[in-house]
């Protein structure tokens, strides 16, 4: 979509009046029905291939996130325990 700027200088105001009318550009060779039929085969092929890949990636990312979360939670838990010990001492 390309903007079509329309600027008119208003004598009553210090700032120009600006307005943009967006006009979409269409490719006449491709219609909605043709592109959907072409993408169906590609979508099926890619979803079959990437289905197992996404499961592996999810498990790997979840494992890495869990390890990072546990490592970062360890000092926080130790500091809370130290504050509790200090509070009991007073």
Image (cartoon, rainbow, N blue to C red):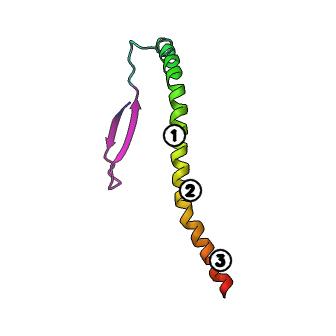
Q: State left or right for residue 52 relative to residue 17.
A: right
- Does the magenta segment cover residue 34? no
Q: Secondary structure at mark 2?
A: helix
Q: Secondary structure at mark 1?
A: helix
User: Which residue is labeled 2 in the image?
Assistant: 70
User: Which residue is labeled 3 in the image?
Assistant: 84
Residue at the (62%, 82%) spot, across then down: 86
Badge 1 density bin: few <14, some 14–19, many ≥20, Cα 10 Å:
few
Residue at the (66%, 86%) spot, across then down: 89
User: Which residue is labeled 1 in the image?
Assistant: 60
Q: Nearer the viewer, residue 21 or 78?
A: 78
Q: CA distance from mark 2 to mark 1?
A: 16 Å
Going from N to C along the chain, the mark reached first, 2 or 1, is 1
Residue 11: x, y in percent? Answer: 32, 51
Residue 13 falls in which quadrant of the image?
Answer: bottom left
Q: Quadrant of the C terminus?
A: bottom right
Going from N to C along the chain, the mark reached first, 3 or 2, is 2
Q: Nearer the viewer, residue 78 or 44?
A: 78
In the rendered view, tell whether residue 82 sits above or below residue 42. below
In the rendered view, tell whether residue 16 sits above or below residue 83. above
Q: CA distance from mark 1 to mark 3?
A: 36 Å
Residue 14: x, y in percent? Answer: 32, 56
Instruction: Look at the numbered discs 2 and 1 and tell me whether their residues touch, using CB distance below 8 Å.
Output: no
């Amino acid at each position: 979509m390309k903007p079509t700027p329309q600027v008119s200088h208003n004598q009553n105001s210090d700032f120009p009046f600006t307005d943009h009318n967006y006009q979409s550009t269409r490719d006449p060779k491709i219609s909605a029905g043709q592109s959907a039929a072409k993408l169906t085969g590609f979508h099926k092929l890619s979803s079959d291939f990437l289905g197992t890949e996404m499961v592996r990636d999810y498990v790997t990312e979840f494992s890495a996130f869990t390890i990072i979360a546990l490592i970062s939670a360890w000092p926080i838990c130790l500091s809370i325990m130290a504050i509790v010990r200090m509070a009991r001492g007073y």
